[in-house]
Amino acid sequence: MLITGGFLFCFGAIGVKLCVEHTKVPDIKVDEKREFDYNLEALRGKIYDRNGQQNPMAMSLFTRLYFVDPHINSTRTCHRTNLVPMVSLLADTLQVERDELWYKYQTISPESYQALLYNNPDDQLWSKYRSHNRRNVIALSDSEEVYSVITNKTLISGVGIKNKVVRTYPGRRRMSHVLGFVNNMGVGSAGVEQCYDSYLRGVQGRIEGQKDARGRIISYRRSILVDPINGSDLYLTLDSNIQHIVEKTLSGVVQKFSAAGGWAIVEKIKTGEIMAMASFPDFEPEFYNNVNSNIWANKAVSVNYEPGSAMKPIIACAALNHGVIDEHQKLDVGLSKIWFYAGRPLRDHVTGMVDLRKALVKSSNIYFAKLGLMMGNECIYRYLRAFNFGTKLGVDLPGEQFGIVRQPQKWDSLTPTRVPIGQGVAVTALQLINAFACIANDGVLMKPYVVDKIVSPNGEVVFKNKPTIIGRPVRRDVAALVREMMIGITKSGGTGKSAAVAGYTVAGKTGTAQKPVDGIYSQTDYYATFVGFIPAVNPEVAILVTVDTPKPQHTGGYVSGPAFAEITSALVRYLEIPPDDFVEEEL
């Protein structure tokens, strides 16, 4: 009995020990597996055009990423004939190619999957797919019907699911250079996505707790729950409809003249609001990695280029404002249509005694070269800087350049004859249109901007942009006089008659500039520009079109003038700008 009792005691002790270890050890493992600590993703703020929430240009969505997962892939245990209908159902459900999906099922292995998934965090997995590394990712979908089909294990096997937040752009290419894009790590990397990233980016939440044996969260076992805070929404000054007009016209003129590219801007004169800004070639922000990175640059603010004769109205304003000349004074441009100064020739297409009005309408090079000598280096430089050339305007977009305006003490004897005709000085398109808007705005220079306001998730306006005066380079009467003179440029006999719009007075100027190549001016490559405003009598909007290296024609009047007219004709109808009362019908 003692032996028996001892045996029973020992057996009981062993049993208790086995029981304790059996319950203790597995409990530790179960707790480790069931405990979780998740970040809760916040949605990035939306971006709307100036018309508000009816026109979302960028938005973030919760969705699911579906991928072939070899760890749960049953293809090795299924007969090939049984796999065919499953792959067909999956392809139909996710709307993907069956052959491509079949290939994924047959070729993906646990080793290759692990290399792809675990060497690249979740937020980079989908970017791998978008970069055409389609090894195991199938598709993205936020459909609950799709989810219910794929999670039905009697129908589908071997598909993994991950929750994702994706940035999508409903307009596809629309406003691509202004919007920019969000990189693989969720950081704004171009356009307003970059400039206003701190506002758009939300704050992650956090949840800690335990799951049950089936992987479901046990609500009463949550130890930490911090809700995410979504990002704030941007409301742009750009109008999606105007942008469409500009983009369509710009792409058309670039393709028509086999050009390297082009850019265009529409600016609201009284406020400095940018209503459209386009650069071509463009891209789809959602698939930004599918194009060369140099296409990401917003050339309307990032390219320094010589304006050519588009500089002449600025010099006219400066000379009048400084009292160097008056509207009636004439200069002799000669009879040979060629003038030598500092050993270099300058050609023209007008002769004789010419006043300022005719010099503008006919775009006389010799007149403005002589006017530049009358003004002097310091005077020219001071007015260029007063119009904000040679410095950033401070637009709320990344990549803005300064332009190039050299200090006057660095000018040679030829420079004062060339800067007035737009050579030896470089501007950005935004600087150029803003200077013309200043002439249209009675000599008041406004700061351009692209974001109207920022609204927090709870509806609070956390930032509101407003019109800002950044200079008054010329008097009101001077701006009005030059504005009136510029109307003749788009009339019969003017260099910009191709930019005329029936029923409206248009003030503008052509610009044809040789591109510098290896330190010398090219004889084949040009920038063709037309910039102006409408209606000239009471201006509302300024428009600029520049085409980079058009061929075979290359002049601003021939290439960019008609594109200006096409944009402007659609614009006055859309904005319901009434025709001028002062337009004379030509018989």
Image (tube, helix red, strand yellow):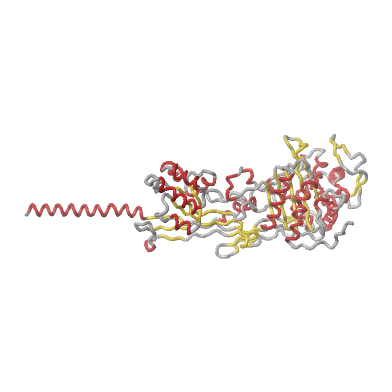
Image position, residue 324 (x, y; %): 87, 49
Q: Is residue 291 left or right of residue 154?
A: right
Q: Is residue 580 above or below residue 360?
A: below
The C terminus, quarter of image: bottom right
Q: Is residue 422 above or below residue 30?
A: above
**Would you identify the image quadrant in which residue 584 lies?**
bottom right
Q: Residue furthest bottom?
A: 459
**Would you identify the image quadrant in which residue 268 lies?**
bottom right
The N terminus, quarter of image: bottom left
Q: Is residue 21 above or below residue 352?
A: below
Q: Would residue 110 be visible to someone looking at this image?
A: yes
**Would you identify the image quadrant in which residue 118 lies?**
top left
Q: Nearer the viewer, residue 485 or 547?
A: 547
Residue at figure coordinates x 70%, y 60% from the top left: 467
Q: Is residue 70 left or right of residue 497?
A: left
Q: Nearer the viewer, residue 178 or 323?
A: 178
Image position, residue 202 (x, y; %): 53, 57
Q: Nearer the viewer, residue 134 or 372?
A: 134
Residue at figure coordinates x 32%, y 54% from the top left: 30
Q: Nearer the viewer, residue 197 or 260?
A: 260
Q: Would residue 203 be visible to someone looking at this image?
A: no
Q: Residue furthest front?
A: 81
Q: Is residue 87 left or right of residue 506?
A: left
Q: How many marks?
A: 0
Image position, residue 311 (x, y; %): 79, 47
Image position, residue 525 (x, y; %): 75, 39
